[in-house]
Amino acid sequence: MNNHFHDSRYYLARAAEHARLGVAETLEPHVDRVRSRLGLAVEAEPEPSRLEAVQADALGLERRAAHRVRGVAGDVRGRVDGGRSSDADDR
């Protein structure tokens, strides 16, 4: 029964997020018009070029790979150190 509540909560949160996005998208032209009339218009940042997007993706992949390698290296060090201490105790 707990899984049903967990699933219901997940789908309810997802529906709420989609509703929020829909309302924001629907109101966006009106909000922009009001902001421009009040002099509060925010200039949109230019979208990154294809090359910049690929470079950003590559950098993110590189960082994730480095993070995973550090984690695996730490696990291996722990296993090696654990094996050395048990070998020293046997002698």
Image: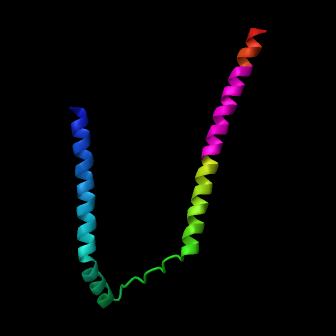
Closer to us: 56 or 88: 56
The residue most toward the right is 91
Up the image or down, 57 lies above or below 88; here it is: below
Up the image or down, 80 lies above or below 67; here it is: above
- Residue 24: image location, x then y, percent: 27, 71
Look at 24% across and 82% down and name the residue there. Answer: 30
Q: Which residues are magenta?
A: 68-84
- Residue 37: image location, x then y, percent: 29, 90
Question: Does the stretch in magenta take in 45?
Answer: no
Quadrant for the C terminus, please: top right
Look at 35% across and 89% down and name the residue there. Answer: 39
Quadrant for the N terminus, please: top left
| Left-right relation of 59 to 47 | right
All told, the count of numbered labels is 0
Question: Does the stretch in magenta take in 72?
Answer: yes
Q: Main secondary structure of the magenta part?
A: helix
Q: How is the image coloured?
A: rainbow
The residue most toward the top is 91
Residue 90 placement: quadrant: top right
Closer to us: 41 or 2: 2
- Residue 9: image location, x then y, percent: 24, 45
- Residue 5: image location, x then y, percent: 22, 39
Look at 30% across and 83% down and name the residue there. Answer: 32
Look at 27% across and 85% down and name the residue there. Answer: 34
Residue 77 placement: quadrant: top right
| Left-right relation of 70 to 10 | right
